[in-house]
Amino acid sequence: MFDVIIIGAGISGAATAYELAKAGHKVAVIDRYGPAAMASGWTLAGVRQSGRDPAELPLARAAVDIWGDLHQILDRPTHYRRGGNLRLGRSEEELAALRAIVDEQSAKGLPITMLEGLEAVRAVAPAVAPHITGASLCTTDGHADPHATVSAFIAAAERLGATMRFGEEVLAIETEDGRVTGVRTTRARIPAGQVVLAAGIFGNDLLNPLGLEVPLKVRLVTVIRSRPVAPMLEQVIGVANAECAGRQEVSGRFRFTSGIEHWHGHMEDGERPRVRPTARDIVETIQLFGALIPATLEAEVEDIWGGLIDQTPDALPVIQRAGNPEGLIIAMGFSGHGFCLGPITGRICAALVEGRDSGFDLAPFMIERFARRNDSAASLTLHG
Ligand SMILES: Cc1cc2nc3c(=O)[nH]c(=O)nc-3n(C[C@H](O)[C@H](O)[C@H](O)COP(=O)(O)OP(=O)(O)OC[C@H]3O[C@@H](n4cnc5c(N)ncnc54)[C@H](O)[C@@H]3O)c2cc1C
């Protein structure tokens, strides 16, 4: 019998497992594939506070505070670099949008400034294209290696006694008299006092039989990764309309993405799931990012994949105790923002399991908010 079963070994589940194991709970993590097999591996892995919804900003800032020491806490590399986030402007209209972000977010205390003119932008990022006329720069944003980070959380949780069950799918969350009693998987029935659902785009498959649903649209993002080239870019690059983003990994590889695209609905199952973008998506992504950082057009392509996003109507996640059934904690719907939040999501979920105050206002992340909403989908921002 486990105290807590965590469904999903993405960054949300892995960080939660670490926090709970550290607090002495008997924990199991179950994943249909393995660590970082879905969004947490497909991701651009920007660690960004700038451009966040005001409700999410306190979480992002708290997460960034943790990211700085995370490799020491977990005793494994995360390849986190606090090189900044540069949102590039290509027209007067975009520059006006960026100035508005800078005004709003510097008033909230973020170290974000406006760089006016190409020269100012090239002074911090010489690789940008000559038609860039300005940029916002948030100096405390950055990026990390997603596989290394999730593996580091998993390894640390294991050292603290957590059990890992990979290649096993949870088929149902079991309940009795309104309380969670465990899970049924492709291999076994596993009893547990509480369950944390961190299953990304598949979360609703397990919530629906309990009469719960997080309204989600699954969206596609095309990702291109190059072979290593000489270091030339420290910041995560975005644009005002979020149509592409990218960064250079510590390994020298460029990893860059499209904005949000339509998903054709096909995912190949295997040891790890794979989604293939269309030729058009690939061409557009290369052209868009290549127009910002021309050197990427000369780099050899190493891999191309599609990443799926669990997008809620307001592009904010659900992080809460369900109430009914008792003993269920939900953490999903991160809408393309959840990698940065991972370390704080873990702490919040651990507090919810223990019935403690997380120290954050979680009202904006309650599932009940959707019943009150009547507006169309919020635009999704992917700026790394
Ligand atoms: C292309 C792309 C770019 C992104 N860029 C950024 C970025 O720059 N910055 C940022 O902060 N965020 C970014 N995101 C978003 C971020 O990566 C995700 O929000 C985050 O990784 C979600 O983590 P998760 O653990 O909640 O979900 P996931 O990583 O999707 O993990 C869910 C896990 O649950 C498992 N699972 C599902 N169903 C079951 C079941 N029934 N039984 C057992 N296991 C199950 C899956 O196998 C999976 O491993 C991006 C996402 C994508 C796709």
Image (cartoon, rainbow, N blue to C red):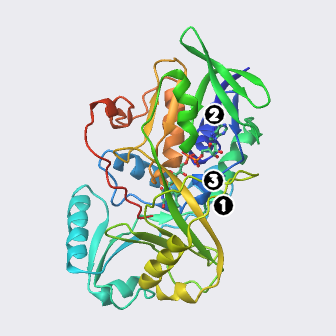
| Residue type beneath disc 2 | Ile
Q: Which residue is mark 3?
A: 267
Q: Which residue is mark 2?
A: 6
**What is the crowding at mark 2: few (fewer than 14 residues within 10 Å), some, or many (at least 20)?**
many
Residue 334 or residue 100, whichever sits in front: 334
Measured in 3D between alpha carbons, the distance from the residue under mark 1 to the one under mark 3, in whole angstroms, is 30 Å
In the picture, which quadrant includes the C terminus?
bottom left
In the picture, which quadrant includes the N terminus?
top right
Label 1 SS: loop
Compared to residue 104, the image places residue 316 above or below, namely above
Quadrant in the rendering for residue 159: top right
Q: Is residue 340 visible?
A: yes
In percent of width and height, residue 263 lies at 51, 56
Apparent side of residue 246 relative to residue 238 in the rendered image (left or right): right
In percent of width and height, residue 146 lies at 61, 59
| In this view, the mark in front (3 or 2) | 3
Label 2 SS: strand
| In this view, the mark in front (1 or 3) | 3
- Picture disc at residue 77: 1
